[in-house]
Amino acid sequence: MSAPILSVENLRIVFDTRHGELTAIDGVSLDIAPGEILGVVGESGAGKSLTGTAIIGLLDPPGRIAGGAIRLEGERIDNLPPEAMRKVRGRRIGAIFQDPLTSLHPMLTIGDQLVETIMTHLPLDRRAARARAVELLGEVGIPSPDMRIDQHPHQFSGGMRQRVVIALALAGEPKLIIADEPTTALDVSIQAQITTLLKRLCLERGAAVMLVTHDMGVIAETADRVAVMYAGRIIETGPVEAVTRRALHPYARGLMASIPSLRERREMLRQIDGAMPRLNAIPPGCAFNPRCGYATEQCRAERPALGNEPHAAACWHPLTGEARG
């Protein structure tokens, strides 16, 4: 096994309020190896995006890292000063966000933005940086890149804009890419193209990818491993096929049951009753216990730990058998 590019150990993120600290991320640990795509999935508010934000050093007050460590290629980066972290971001960590319009300057051409990013992170002059920008646009599937490089973001479709954002994320030749809901705003056919592109680039460049999404279908098609988050904790992790077909945690099993299947007919998709608890009302024991049909007194009193097995769940009564057909 290769040494992980990203290693997160017992990460804890809190928000300081007038009423005290609210814990948003509580003891999250994960590793991503070179060439691997880790899918991080869960409902809105589970802490997926917040974990990614902390990794790339964009956590704003009143949020702060209160414990744990984040290491990139063995080097701790969560305690770097802002100026040092700016050099890491873009050069060693690339970011792809949900809405490409918020990542692109509407008044600048695509080429201007790519060339500036490349010159910031690589020792190239403007001519060489422009040539590299054209190459990048071609790599991510932009047709006629030598012509389209001088166009503005509004002249691109949504899917093409997202391809440009991926090119920007790759401009500094990073070892790690944080992709936060990169396909949510796109239609299904464009989603498939973007996920295929991410897999190809990961394979060719040997980069590690953390794919944050609430869409289990995207995870099933794209990721090598998956981490399921609930109420600020990872409650199940394992190879993507094992988790999607034989989920151990009742919450993860419910998420998998929400994926439409071509192998069986259903009148309605299954749902998980209830809602995720607020940060100031997380119950003792397993945070999922108020919504769980398998909960016991132990579940309501003691918080289960996530094991070290390749496929592990933080659950006192893990399920067995196939999750879906």
Image: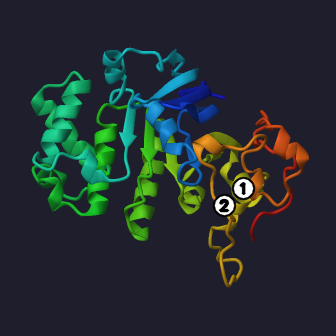
Residue 233 picture location, percent across and down: 65, 39
Residue at image coords 66%, 29%: 1
> Toward the viewer: 130 or 312?
312
User: Where is residue 310, by image quadrant?
Assistant: top right
> Toward the viewer: 65 or 157?
65
Name the amino acid type tagged 1.
Tyr
| Residue at disc 1, secondary structure | helix
Instruction: Note whether residue 186 is visible.
Output: yes
Q: Is residue 293 above or below residue 29?
A: below
Q: Is residue 200 above or below residue 83?
A: below
| Residue at disc 2, secondary structure | helix
Q: Would you name the residue on which mark 1 appears?
A: 251
How many marks the image carries: the answer is 2
Residue at image coords 65%, 75%: 269
Real-space Cα separation, disc 1 to disc 2, in angstroms: 6 Å
- Pointer 1: residues within 10 angstroms few (<14), some, or many (20+)? many
Q: Would you name the residue on which mark 2 appears?
A: 255
Residue 32's mark? Answer: none
Give the image's coloring scheme: rainbow
> Toward the viewer: 49 or 31?
49
User: Where is residue 294, by image quadrant?
Assistant: bottom right
The answer to whether residue 80 is left or right of residue 221 is left
Residue 231 picture location, percent across and down: 63, 45
Residue at image coords 10%, 32%: 127
Q: Is residue 262 above or below residue 173?
A: below
Residue at image coords 63%, 58%: 275
Seen as rendered, the residue at the extreme front is: 19
CB within 8 Å, label 1 to label 2: yes
- Pointer 2: residues within 10 angstroms few (<14), some, or many (20+)? many
Name the amino acid type tagged 2.
Leu
Residue 194 picture location, percent across and down: 40, 57
